[in-house]
Image: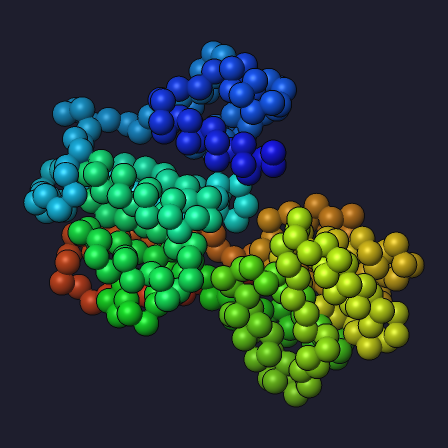
Amino acid sequence: MHAEERHQAILLRLRERGSLRVTEFAEELGVSAITVRRDVESLAERGLLERVHGGAVPRQAPRGAAGGPRPVPAGAPRPPAGAGARLTFGLIVPAADYYYPDVIKGARAAAAARGVRLVLGISQYSPTEEQAQARQLLADGVDGLLITPCGPVAEQGWLAELPVPHLLVERRPAPGLARAESVVTDHAAGALAAVRHLVDRGRRRIGLLLREDSPHTPLVEEGYLGGLAAAGLAADEVLRLRLSPPGTDQDGRARAIERFADAVAAGELDGALVHNDHDAIVLLQRLRARGLSVPQDLAIVAYDDEVAALADIPLTAVAPPKHAVGASAVGLLADRLADPDRPGHRLAILPELRVRDSSDAAH
């Protein structure tokens, strides 16, 4: 069982039973108690639970003098924002161990600053679980929902039926959600900045490796193509490849990465944008195994900046403003509740390019 699966199992157990004993849960999962203890420590550091002797309990949000908000049935009248009632927001994300931890931290910090209680739900990339989490949060009486839909855009129509204000986080609304508000990273701008950086380093044959399962893939590709066009460079489809997720189609993944390495060896490729960090590190390792140098033979820019700095040659990376996305989402939803008639907002925040050794050398 992967760490993400264990983390989700721990959070689900706490939600269902309200507590967890490390030794008993480790036995259920068939792993060591040390492994579960480390998982609990990791989740506690992210503020997703509280450690107690021998186990864990759900994180307790500070309660007001009146004992905090009581659950309100979905659809029931709610006191207006600013009327003295403490607001409760639900936050539903696909996972809590890659990309989203900083989104969660940003949302938690903004909620604390505004006196809002934040309740977390994890969909595990399952549209069915996502809707189940939403129903439970509504039944518990949340005043608004922050949600990162994990299903296809065309299947977001159910969000329009929610009885409370909601806001999309790191997802652009489907056409049918004309009034939906959102806070996203401008991924196209991030990819364009990466290409511009490579061009500024003298690279002219720039390829693209994309994770085919990511909802950000179309925007990253859009920015990549825009960056090439702005520099007057041709977009070679042969050097624009998509990778399946790790653990699936291993042969296909290996062929795509080998194709990139062949192109570098043949002088057909001198720069690359790779989404995401994991695949950028795999490519780096394959190049070095073949005696090819980074950044001399190939300058690499990764996308996500979760672990890019930890590569044996630290990777230049586009860093989405995850903390700011979470914080801004809470702020916009709170503003919506305070002023239901204000114009709708869709906020796109620019990512940051963090330059490291994998591209920072003269060509």
Percent x, y for residue 233? 68, 85
**In screen coordinates, is 187 left or right of 246?**
left
Q: Residue at x 49, y 62 (%)?
A: 215
Where is 327 relative to 2, above or below?
Answer: below
Q: Judge from the rendering whether residue 249 lies leftward or rightward of residue 346; answer left or right.
A: right
Which residue does the image show at 16% across and 43% down from the upper left?
74
- Farthest-out residue, right: 291
Residue 62 visible, this angle: yes
Say which residue appears at 41% left-offset and 41% top-offset. 122
Q: How many marks?
A: 0
Tell me the quarter of the image containing the N terminus.
top right
Vertical arrangement, residue 361 with respect to residue 87, above or below: below
Of residue 199 and residue 135, the one placed in the foreground of this image is 135
Question: Residue 136 in the image: x percent, y percent?
Answer: 27, 39
Residue 76, horizontal then vertical, whole percent: 10, 43
Q: Position of residue 342 (x, y in %)?
A: 17, 64
Which of the 4 image quadrants contains residue 156? bottom left
Above or below residue 287? Residue 107 is above
Residue at x 70%, y 45% (from the top left corner): 310
80 over 259 or under it: above or below: above
335 left or right, relative to 305: left
